[in-house]
Image: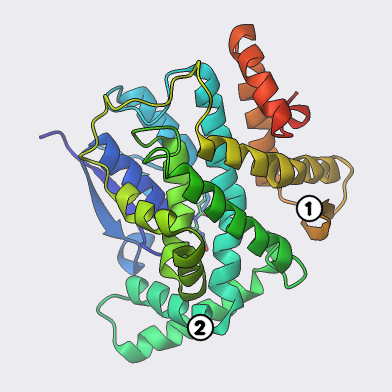
Amino acid sequence: MDKPYRLIGSNPSPYSVKMRALMRYRRLPFFWEWRNPGNIEETRDVKPQVIPILQYPDGSFRNDSTFVALDLEEKHKERSALPEDPGQRFLNFLLEDMADEWGTKCMFHYRWFYAQDQDFCSKWIAGEWGMGASYGAVLERAAQFRDRQVGRMALVGCTPENRPVIEESYLRVLRVLDEGLKQYPFIFGQRPTLADFGWFGQLFQLYTDPTPSQQMRITGPRVYMWVPRVDDCSGVSAEAELADPDGPLPHSVLGLLKLAGEVYLPFLAANAHAIRNGAEEVTLPIWGMPYRQVTFRYQAKCYDWLRQQFAALDNGARGQLEPVLEEAGCLSYLR
Ligand SMILES: N[C@@H](CCC(=O)N[C@@H](CS)C(=O)NCC(=O)O)C(=O)O
């Protein structure tokens, strides 16, 4: 057997379970290792210090799930998680990016806003970190971790003032996916793609954490069934078809695009604009409600990257997408 990859992550980490599900679907040989004091020293030089970290068979370490996923696409051609059609591939990147950068606000808000979620999640995270430690040590670390995360909420926009927008966006994601999953088992058709893995990472957490989990069962019962499905798609045939690129787009794709046009792209554009003007905060109305947070450089890079991907499409592919993007309110943000 080929020397396996080593995936260092944690179950309560959205990007870690995203990567694990992707590698399972792709049938890449790997083993999973919990992030813990034992491997933190060994990976001290990996920058930024975020999980998941993937150690390649040659011993090198890499992180940032999107770029690792793309690198794995280069290295392994079988069982690709990207649509072949260039237009669908672009939409896939957009939806994955929205999961990573906006979906995570829903995840972080629910995890650290309500007392029952704070309590459950801090113990979950501390328990995975300190596996084998005394329960007293776990409780102590849970309290420290909870305080640290609650202290970071404003940094990512998870403030009480933004709660109506964030919770509304979670409900809309659930409704849109729930509807789409009546049509196909995955976002783009009969097999999962990177967009599924991106949304899976965030929704796996929302499926587990008490308050949003209950909401998911009520508002998105099919999403609640989809989460464990995406977790292990190693048995899904890579020949299973995605929706015909010349036909209508799947309901999930159309619904998520509409959310991108209403929420995610206006946020990315306002964030980039604020950074260009040297402002510290980005403010914009979403669904008639105020949304405000400190600017985020990483998300300005995401926006540039998405626009480059769109610009790099050939005229045929771009021309085919334009009416759909226009209808969803996305087009003006991408040109
Ligand atoms: N864009 C990165 C984000 C990774 C990330 O933010 N990971 C979080 C956990 S889910 C982390 O390690 N945060 C470091 C910390 O909380 O100190 C990716 O896609 O992998």
Q: Would residue 51 be seen by someone viewing this image from the given angle?
A: no
Is the C terminus in the top left, top right, bottom left or bottom right quadrant?
top right
**110 relative position to 327: left or right:** left
According to the picture, the residue beneath numbered tag 1 turns out to be 286
**Circle 2: is it few (<14), some (14-19), or many (20+) Cα within 10 Å?**
some
Q: Position of residue 29 (x, y in %)?
A: 20, 39
Q: Position of residue 185 (x, y in %)?
A: 36, 41
Tell me the element at label 2: helix
Please state which of residues 73 and 266 is positioned toward the viewer in this rendering: 266
Amino acid at circle 2: Gln
Amino acid at circle 1: Ile
Q: Position of residue 26 (x, y in %)?
A: 28, 35
Q: Quadrant of residue 330?
A: top right
* Residue 83 higher or lower than 317, as above or below: below
Q: Position of residue 61 (x, y in %)?
A: 37, 43
Please state which of residues 209 and 101 is positioned toward the viewer in this rendering: 209
